[in-house]
Amino acid sequence: MFLQRTLRQSVEVNGIGLHSGKPASVVLRPAPPGSGVHVERVDLESRPSATAHFNNVHATARATTIGNEYFTAATVEHCLSVFSALRIDNAIVELRGPEVPIGDGSAAPFLTAVKSAGVVEQEDARRYFFIKEPVRMDSGDSYAYVVPYNGLRITCTIDFPHPSIGKQTIDIDVNEYNFETEIAKARTFGFLHEVEKLKAQGLVQGASLENAIGLDANGILNPEGLRYADEFVRHKVLDALGDLTTLGAPLLGHLVLYKAGHDLMNKFVRRVKESTSAYEIVELGTAIRNTEF
């Protein structure tokens, strides 16, 4: 049986917010078993908080924002993807501002921080959404569906009419090693022709080539180039892993994504939860054998 996990000790990550453009700071703290992941704004007088749950997803425009009537906390998905890959069930994400730091645009800064803090097992068993029947969500020409699988496997396809991207597909069994070597370093990306429009909407105020892959009509603007030949689709897997954590428990299934973004993932997670006949809540080892994570 797998046990729930949390951080061994607290760890801090500092930087700027991708969308706010303001200094951003987050402290990741241990939390008791069964408590889940809580996002808290300690810069506000009442220190409002909310669980990282799909019911508390406040916005999905270019990032996942957790919040309620008292606060918002934007760009949580990169941090949450690390929690997913390292099987961290319980933690406090303590923000001093409206946004999680963007770092270099990938999950690597959070992976480094969490590994430096350490991860410990707790006394309660870890519970999973074990998919028994297919569940699907369509949105325009995008879709997400999951079918039974003894583990977490993601097949993700993107298709952008750009010479440096085009159609890319990745198929990966998600575990801690594969996440660290194949997914964590993949950066977010954006198009130069969209920047002014997004800034007018209050987004990407802190975007730069230090924290994103920039593209113009002809190619990639970053002088160092890409970290992976298909870095774009790998980052979409990273984002999806973060958004999946809002289900409230880890998913066991083969997830297939086509042109998926944060909004589709939020709708998909809700669809999974309401499809009660399609899954069973299990403790790993009672229903699934010989599966490594």
Image: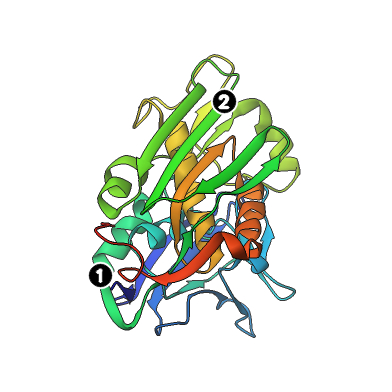
- Quick check: 248 left or right of 174? right
Q: Nearer the viewer, residue 235 or 211?
A: 235
Q: Give the class, few, some or many, for how many residues have Cα within 10 Å of label 2's Cα (few <14, many ≥20).
A: few
- Quick check: 280 left or right of 276? left
Q: Nearer the viewer, residue 132 or 253?
A: 132
Residue 286 x, y percent position in the rendering:
33, 71
Q: Nearer the viewer, mark 2 or mark 1?
A: 2
Residue position for label 2: 159
- The three-letter code of the residue at mark 1 reads Gly
Colour basis: rainbow
Specify the quadrant that holds the N terminus.
bottom left
Q: On residue 271, which mark appears?
A: none
Residue at position x 57%, y 25% in the image: 159
Q: Is residue 73 visible?
A: no
Residue at position x 40%, y 83% in the image: 33
Local secondary structure at mark 2: strand
- The three-letter code of the residue at mark 2 reads Asp
- Quick check: 107 left or right of 121? right
Local secondary structure at mark 1: loop
- Quick check: 89 left or right of 20? left
Q: Is residue 252 above or below residue 27?
A: above
Residue 143 x, y percent position in the rendering:
63, 39
Q: Is residue 60 visible?
A: yes
Residue position for label 1: 118
Q: Nearer the viewer, residue 4 or 70?
A: 4
Residue at position x 63%, y 61% in the image: 275
Q: Give the class, few, some or many, for how many residues have Cα within 10 Å of label 1's Cα (few <14, many ≥20).
A: some
Q: Are marks 2 and 1 in contact (CB under 8 Å)?
A: no
Which circle's residue, 2 or 1, is located before the other in the chain? Answer: 1
Residue at position x 50%, y 67% in the image: 280
Residue 25 x, y percent position in the rendering:
47, 65
